[in-house]
């Protein structure tokens, strides 16, 4: 039986993302997310609240985009996996913690709107801006052009993309 280690959280950033680079140049960003849960106690009818705090780590372009786009207090959606990290303190004590290694990070649109700016695709440095010739590359030997999103696919038959045409539940 396959094990699944995927988590989804929605919460608010507790601190600014901290961007660092490994010795080999790999970007990594860390930040905290607080997830609030509220409910009404059935016995007392009092409103209760609980907050859980999660450390999140992102790698590569996700880390760079998170560091340049997110700020403390923002509401985000994080999808990733739980990872346990262990280390030894200067006093020789073993410590460990569970953190979320992010696969996807997005702003929550429940109480805000955002403007999305698509980054240009990066490619390995090639002399004269040419793409190396290869049989499986559609632009082999051509000058690099900025990345453009492909044209959107048409909606499936019977599916409306306009909210005004949708029937209520």
Image (cartoon, helix red, strand yellow):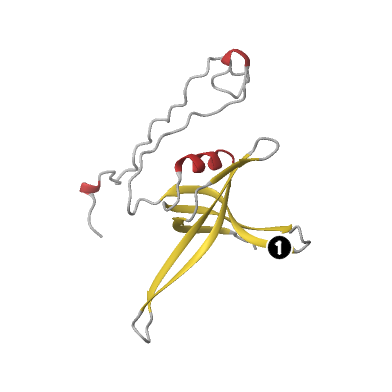
Q: Is residue 127 above or below residue 156?
A: above
The reply to whether residue 2 is visible in this rendering is no
User: x, y (%) of residue 71?
Assistant: 45, 47
Frontmost residue, 153 versus 90: 90
Q: Is residue 105 above or below residue 126?
A: below
Which part of the image, by quadrant, shows the C terminus?
bottom left
Query: Splitting the image into 4 quarters, where does residue 136 fall?
Result: top right
Q: Which residue is mark 1?
A: 95
User: x, y (%) of residue 10?
Assistant: 44, 58
Residue in view at x 44 percent, y 58 percent: 11
Q: Residues within 10 Å of mark 1 (few under 14, many from 20)?
A: few
The reply to whether residue 15 is visible in this rendering is yes
Residue in view at x 62 percent, y 14 percent: 127
Residue that sits furthest to the bottom in the current view: 43
Number of numbered discs:
1
User: x, y (%) of residue 63?
Assistant: 55, 42
Residue that sits furthest to the top in the current view: 128
Residue that sits furthest to the left in the current view: 164
Frontmost residue, 117 versus 29: 29
Which part of the image, by quadrant, shows the N terminus?
bottom right
26 relative position to 47: left or right: right
Query: Splitting the image into 4 quarters, where does residue 150 fall?
Result: top left
Label 1 element class? strand
């Amino acid at each position: 039986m396959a094990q699944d280690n995927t988590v989804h959280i929605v919460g608010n950033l507790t601190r600014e993302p901290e961007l660092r680079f490994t010795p080999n140049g790999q970007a990594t960003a860390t930040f905290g997310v607080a997830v609030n849960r509220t409910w009404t106690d059935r016995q007392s009818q009092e409103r209760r609240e609980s907050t859980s705090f999660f450390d999140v780590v992102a790698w590569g372009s996700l880390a760079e985009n998170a560091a340049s786009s997110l700020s403390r207090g923002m509401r985000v959606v994080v999808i990733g996996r739980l990872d346990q990290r262990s280390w030894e303190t200067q006093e020789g004590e073993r410590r460990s913690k569970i953190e979320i290694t992010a696969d996807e990070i997005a702003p929550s649109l429940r109480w805000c709107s955002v403007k999305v700016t698509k980054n240009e695709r990066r490619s390995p440095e090639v002399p004269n801006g040419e793409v190396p010739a290869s049989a499986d590359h559609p632009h082999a030997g051509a000058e690099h052009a900025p990345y453009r999103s492909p044209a959107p696919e048409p909606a499936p038959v019977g599916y409306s993309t306009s909210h005004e045409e949708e029937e209520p539940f």
